[in-house]
Amino acid sequence: MSQFNTSGSKQTLKILAALRTALVNQFGEPAEDSDYSLVWVAFCRLVIETSSAAFNHVSMSFNDQVTHFEIEYVEQLFLSILGFILKTAEIKIPGDARVMKMDARNISGLEDIKVNKVITSPPYPNRISYIRELRPYMYWTKFLNEAKEAGELDWLAIGGTWGIATSRLLSWRIQEENLPEEVFSTVERIEISNGKNAQLLSIYVLKYFHDMHLHLSSMRSVLQDKAELHYIVGNSTFFGNMVDTASLLSTSMRLLGYSDIQSEIIRKRNCNKALYEYCISANWSAT
């Protein structure tokens, strides 16, 4: 059962906090490579289901009304979510996987690994911050403890623009100047526009394509001969200036020696009539 109120749901918050304490006592704090990771995945899902967050937009916002849940409902919901996750985890997925923490702009230490296919969807140059959207779960699982940590983490991410990551843009200096000329012309159009914070956002766009160029350059060190690359990206607009992400990244690939570069629209995005998602495909020859 639930009832609606315009104030914050302290009742639901207390229930979640109590459940979290019980889970810690039973399974320990969330940690990487934990045998009980699925329990914490279920808890994060519970946080989503009992929150007042609205997920009808690419950036998380909050509903005007807050739902207050009773403890019995929260308990049953958690058990239902956990049961579903455990059931789906019974089927073993073929193959093996390794997760490695690394700066995508400087891929190193992988001398024993060569890949023949890259399939990824990097951030788009649209100022959407992944860490901003993930903060509630990162705090609940204590992978973040202070607000400044979110900004520090976002500064390390390509396209990161949350908190301190934004203020640092003004002091950022370019490292790689061998970028597509079209990147600089796009950045200039944004900079001279009449938009609010146009200079700051022009630097943001420059840094995004600068970092993606570094990534594509570094990626070559781990590619097998005839390796395939498939990147899902989206375009964006700043003050009426189109940022043609697919074209600019394709040009970066061409400058770096990739071949058979193609781009195709895969879907229309619902946030703007001029925005699309593209799949950029390319091949790499080691000879």
Image: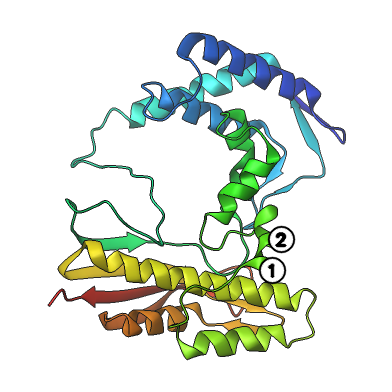
> As drawn, which residue projects farthest toward the right?
6
* Front-most of residues 145 and 62: 145
* Front-most of residues 63 and 44: 44
Question: Image quadrant for the C terminus?
Answer: bottom left
* Front-most of residues 263 and 82: 263
Q: Are marks 2 and 1 in contact (CB under 8 Å)?
A: yes
The residue where tag 1 is placed is: 170
- Look at the numbered disc 2 and give the secondary structure of its residue: helix
- Look at the numbered disc 1 and give the secondary structure of its residue: helix
Expressed as whole percent of the image width and height from the top left, the position of residue 238 reads 67, 78
Q: Is residue 257 visible?
A: yes
How many labels sit on residues? 2
Q: Which mark is residue 262?
A: none
Q: Residue at x 53, y 15 (%)?
A: 23
Expressed as whole percent of the image width and height from the top left, the position of residue 219 reads 30, 65
Q: Is residue 284 left or right of residue 75?
A: left
Expressed as whole percent of the image width and height from the top left, the position of residue 112 reads 16, 50
In the rendered image of this protein, does residue 159 appear above or below residue 72? below
Expressed as whole percent of the image width and height from the top left, the position of residue 116 reads 18, 62
Q: Residue at x 44, y 69 (%)?
A: 212
The amino acid beneath tag 1 is: Leu
**Residue 34, quarter of picture:** top left
Q: Is residue 268 visible?
A: no
Q: Which mark is residue 167?
A: 2
Question: Image quadrant for the N terminus?
Answer: top right
In the rendered image of this protein, does residue 265 appear above or below residue 128? below
Within-10-Å neighbours for mark 2: few <14, some 14–19, many 20+: few
The amino acid beneath tag 2 is: Ser
Q: Residue at x 66, y 21 (%)?
A: 16
Q: How is the image coloured?
A: rainbow
Q: Gap between marks 2 and 1, in whole Å?
A: 6 Å
Q: Residue at x 57, y 76 (%)?
A: 206
